[in-house]
């Protein structure tokens, strides 16, 4: 088997699942001490890219970030935990889910802040799109995310086409 064949072997979701943690500092917040949405979006992008890099073992670019809801605020001193997982691979692109929690270690509380779906495209050093190895879901939850990712891809494609037509 060649090295390239090795690189294209399907990989389980667990191999690239990633976790990132940030403490909210004053520079991350608005004047009331609440975490800025833009800063959280940046962290979500970084956490998503970690899983995408690990899975594809390649460079990646963010092609799209789906709708984002901010369910609960995070404040100065809170610990923000971001967990990312490759939900499904298509050809050169993959959907990564990022789930964000805020942990108040003084009160021992953990709350769901936001969830996001990002599409990353794998590229080589010359910027050309490259195929990504398949991802293998192993748990019921991973299988559900895999199926849902297929439906979301159809919705994204319809939406892209609708926007393309409205521009022409
Ligand atoms: C994203 C990008 C690579 C797509 O390139 P392209 O030549 O227009 O896309 P193609 O039509 O060849 O599609 C390539 C893949 O991207 C996917 N894709 C392209 N645009 C997409 C979008 N808006 N949403 C989701 N997926 C998208 C396609 O479905 C395809 O996936 P597949 O190979 O798994 O089927 C290109 O538009 C780009 O480089 N954008 C800038 C990315 C960037 O700078 N991001 C922020 C900084 S990281």
Image (cartoon, rainbow, N blue to C red):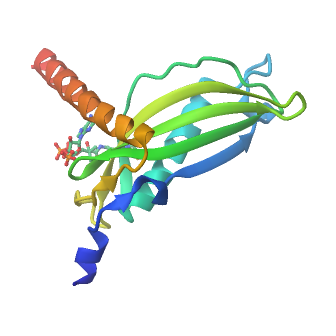
Q: Name which residue lies at 52% across and 19% down.
A: 69
99 left or right, relative to 36:
left
Residue 125 place in picture, x, y as percent = 32, 67
Q: Is residue 93 above or below residue 40?
A: below
34 left or right, relative to 127:
right
Q: Name which residue lies at 56% across and 26% down.
A: 114
Looking at the figure, which quarter contains the C terminus? top left
Residue 9 place in picture, x, y as percent = 28, 68
Residue 60 place in picture, x, y as percent = 37, 54
Q: Nearer the viewer, residue 27 or 16?
A: 16
Q: Name which residue lies at 38% across and 36% down.
A: 145
Looking at the figure, which quarter contains the N terminus? bottom left
Q: Name which residue lies at 47% across and 52% down.
A: 51
Q: Give the image quarter of residue 24.
A: top right
Q: Give the image quarter of residue 30.
A: top right
Q: Is residue 101 above or below residue 86?
A: above
Query: Given the current orientation, which residue lies at the most extreme right position?
Result: 106
């Amino acid at each position: 088997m060649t090295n390239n064949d090795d690189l294209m072997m399907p990989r389980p979701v667990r191999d690239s699942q990633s976790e990132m943690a940030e403490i909210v500092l004053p520079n991350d917040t608005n004047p009331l001490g609440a975490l800025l949405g833009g800063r959280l979006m940046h962290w979500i992008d970084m956490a998503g890219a970690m899983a995408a890099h690990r899975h594809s073992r390649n460079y990646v670019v963010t092609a799209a970030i789906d709708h984002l809801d901010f369910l609960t605020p995070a404040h100065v001193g809170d610990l923000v935990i971001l967990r990312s997982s490759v939900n499904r691979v298509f050809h050169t692109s993959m959907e990564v889910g990022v789930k964000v929690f805020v942990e108040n270690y003084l009160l021992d509380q953990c709350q769901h802040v936001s969830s996001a779906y990002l599409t990353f495209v794998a590229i080589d050093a010359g910027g050309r799109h490259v195929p990504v190895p398949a991802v293998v879901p192993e748990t019921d939850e991973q299988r559900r995310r895999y199926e849902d990712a297929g439906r979301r891809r159809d919705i994204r494609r319809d939406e892209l086409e609708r926007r393309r037509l409205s521009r022409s």
